[in-house]
Amino acid sequence: MSDRRVIICGAGPSGLTAALFLSRAGVPVTVLESREGLYDDPRAATFHPPTMEMFAESGVTKRLHELGILCPRWQFRGRDEGIIAEFDLGILADVTPYPYRLQCEQHKLVAVLADILAGFSTCDIHYGATVETVSQTSDGVTVTTADGTEYQGAYVIGADGGRSVVRKSQDIDFAGFTYQERFLVITTPTDFEQQGFALSCYVSDPAEWCALFKVPGAGPPGIWRVVFPTKPEHTAEELLDFASAQQRLQGFIPREQPYSIVHTNLYTVHQRVASTYRSGRVLLAGDAAHVNNPLGGMGMNFGIHDAVSVATKLARVLNGESDELLNLYDRQRRHVANAFLQAMTIQNKRVLEEKDPVQRDMRLNEMRETAKDPAKARTFLLRTAMFEGIWAAEKVA
Ligand SMILES: Cc1cc2nc3c(=O)[nH]c(=O)nc-3n(C[C@H](O)[C@H](O)[C@H](O)COP(=O)(O)OP(=O)(O)OC[C@H]3O[C@@H](n4cnc5c(N)ncnc54)[C@H](O)[C@@H]3O)c2cc1C
């Protein structure tokens, strides 16, 4: 057995980020991924400034800039009211070299990471390798895949998504809740910018909120994704049907000619955090450790921040420092998952869907006031652009 090799389960954004930071620190890595190759599921597409800072040195940020769309402004709107508040990340130019959101699909990040990792002879990625069991002794871990192959290493990182086999193998609780309504994502080439929409917008409405943002798609001019809530009584087939998606878009912004629809996707949405991110030699990161609704574009970014934190600390432990650092990883990242990721995404959804007219007015006014007051806007952007969560994690001892 390698006394330093780290086995990573899952080659999504979190797993490959951990692989990159470990590889750059000279730690041998084996990544096990159940898919047969790269994928293009249209999930995360928003990169926040701290994530771009973390990826800068490895060249990932430069590659993402070649592929993505810069989004310096985002809007909070009311479906009937129009623009309620517009936020310009440019006011954070003294805090970050990346004062904007970068819109780029997560599968493109995964491809960039896999490409860079191919340059490390110490990193192997095995596709078509579904992890089934994980066991550990006091000096190592054994991971077994569906075909019976055993992989041995010093530690394992479970970055295998919300249904994590690694998390389940250690009986780690995943408490929280699942929303009744699923989220429908409709993709269309219609350019909403021409109608005054910023490239990322949240639209509040007591009956049917929505969120829309532009992604690069196959290249310029890009495509738009519009996210709607759905009613629990509707079947997936009904919701994914292009004719009903057409009605949704027409209901949102009516127009004479039909919208062109590229695809529709439906997601079940949960708010959950693992009860621990460490069980001996088994560590969790990304969706395996926490899941949340996509409003605010935080889940993937947060998973990347976990991955950087766990990989950096693990490399130090494998170079002889105390494994107490891994407990620190658990304390830091789990604290901010609860205090920031969960709190903010739950709040984001509440603001969008508020039905009580008095509460709704109050929330919309708060947003207006925040946008108008430069000090409040700055505080708000430091939080929503995910700086505050990182600073808070660093303060946890
Ligand atoms: C509609 C939608 C929009 C979103 N938008 C954003 C956004 O704009 N910004 C943002 O930050 N987040 C967003 N998210 C959340 C984001 O997609 C996830 O947080 C992110 O994918 C988590 O990355 P991960 O690597 O932790 O897990 P995953 O992406 O789930 O990757 C896990 C990997 O593990 C593999 N795997 C699973 N089980 C096994 C096994 N047993 N053995 C081996 N491999 C296994 C899977 O095949 C997968 O490749 C969005 C999510 C949705 C649904």
Image: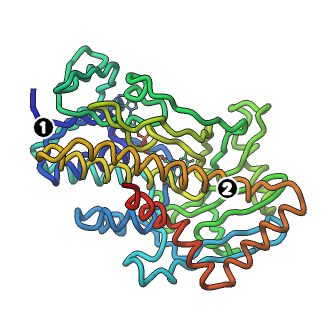
Q: Which secondary structure, mark 1?
A: loop
Q: Position of residue 258 (x, y in %)?
A: 74, 56
- Name of the residue lying farthest toward the top: 148
Front one among 245 and 233? 233
For the point 66% across and 45% down, the residue is 184
Q: Is residue 350 above or below residue 89?
A: above
Choose the circle earlier in sequence order: 1 or 2.
1
Judge from the rendering whether residue 335 lies leftward or rightward of residue 10; answer left or right. right
Disc 2 target residue: 347
- Name of the residue lying farthest toward the right: 357
Disc 1 target residue: 4
Quadrant where ligand 1 appears = top left
Q: Position of residue 394 (x, y in %)?
A: 37, 60
Judge from the rendering whether residue 124 lies leftward or rightward of residue 328; answer left or right. left
Judge from the rendering whether residue 75 lies leftward or rightward of residue 57; answer left or right. right
For the point 22% across and 25% down, the residue is 141
Label 2 crowd (10 A; few <14 / some 14-19 / many >=20): few
Q: Are marks 1 and 2 in contact (CB under 8 Å)?
A: no
Q: Which secondary structure, mark 2?
A: helix
Distance between the alpha carbons at the discs numbered 1 and 2? 42 Å
Q: Is residue 372 above or below residue 318?
A: below
Q: Quadrant of the N terminus?
A: top left
For the point 53% across and 42% down, the residue is 291
